[in-house]
Amino acid sequence: MRLLLLLALICIVNPTKAAQVAIIIDDIGYRQTDTAVLSLPSAITLSVLPHTPLGKEIAQLANDSGYEIMLHLPMQALNGKKQGPGGLTNQMDEQEFKQTVANALESIPNVKGVNNHMGSLLTQMGEQMMWLMESLKQRDSYFVDSVTTRYTKAGEMANKLGIPKLKRQIFLDNDVSEAALERQFQQVIQQANNEGQVVVIAHPYPETIHFLQKNLGRLQQQGLTLVKTSQLLPYRLAQKDPKIAGSKTHRQ
């Protein structure tokens, strides 16, 4: 009897927390169709490219509607693909690099965090990733590593400065066919249940928006909670605790 009472007390004091899913829609800012992301629940996080024709407007509308806004910061890729405005390269010295980051952050209002656009080359470079984290520390921003290379050093540098950080675990829409989206969505559900949380990156493709509109309700049916990305940050890191210093790859 005492054992049963003790177990009941433990459950009351420390109730089981529902597994959580954060979905980041990035690559926002160039197309008028990107505004379709505003039809999704405000628990979806929107990551906006800097210096884009529609980025500032969409970010402001989204913030007014309760969405969390991130900066989708372009970084140099191994394949030499052009980064677009605000892109960071390994040819920049520290001053130019940090000024480029600052300008990108200034171009999008209400930014809470940053994730990398492309970056399979630059995220492997410890010095440049340290410059990035130093810039984010000044802005109290968190970082999500899109993991476009398995050799990324972004998380390591974030830990050294105590920057709140997460990493992408699943890309939802490398293939936008219905069957492929369903396979990835099933993986989201499975991984969230297995690990307690999962960070997903998707894009504002019409097929992706339509799929999410139809299927996001299944998360709750599976006992999962859709949350803003910052809600997955380790609590003590999010509180800037000074004691803490520390699938498939989408290559770009």
Image: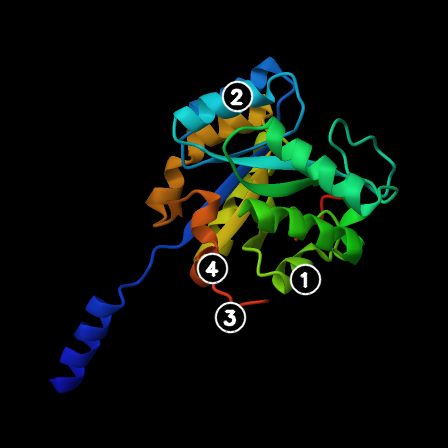
Tell me the amino acid under the disc marked 1: Glu
Using the image as rendered, state which of residue 142 and residue 94 is in the foreground.
Answer: 94
Q: Nearer the viewer, mark 1 or mark 3?
A: 3
Task: Give me the C-alpha separation between circle 4 and circle 3.
Answer: 13 Å
Q: Disc 4, disc 3: CB below 8 Å?
A: no
Q: Which comes before the other along the chain, label 4 or label 1?
A: 1
Residue 43 at x, y = what percent? 41, 37
Decide if residue 175 is in sight here.
no
Residue 144 pos. (x, y %): 59, 48
Q: Badge 3 local density, few (<14 within 10 Å), some, or many (20+)?
A: few
- Judging by the rendered image, the residue that carries numbered circle 3 is 243
Q: Find the distance from the CA under tag 2 to the CA under tag 1.
A: 32 Å
- Seen from this angle, which residue lies furthest front? 95
- Asked where in the image residue 25 lies, by quadrant, the reply is top right
Q: Residues within 10 Å of mark 2 (few under 14, many from 20)?
A: many
Give 102 or 186, whichever is nearer the viewer. Answer: 102
Q: Which residue lies at the image location 43% right of the left edge and 22% below the top edge?
A: 39
Mark-to-mark CA distance, 2 and 3? 37 Å
Residue 156's label in the rendered image is 1
Which callout, 4 or 2, points at the residue further toward the start of the chain? 2
| Horizontal side of residue 8 vs 65, given as left or right | left
Indicate the position of residue 138 as horizontal and vertical percent values. Answer: 59, 48
Q: Amino acid at mark 4?
A: Pro
Badge 4 is on which residue?
234
SS for tag 1?
Answer: helix
Mark 2 or mark 1: which comes first in sequence? 2
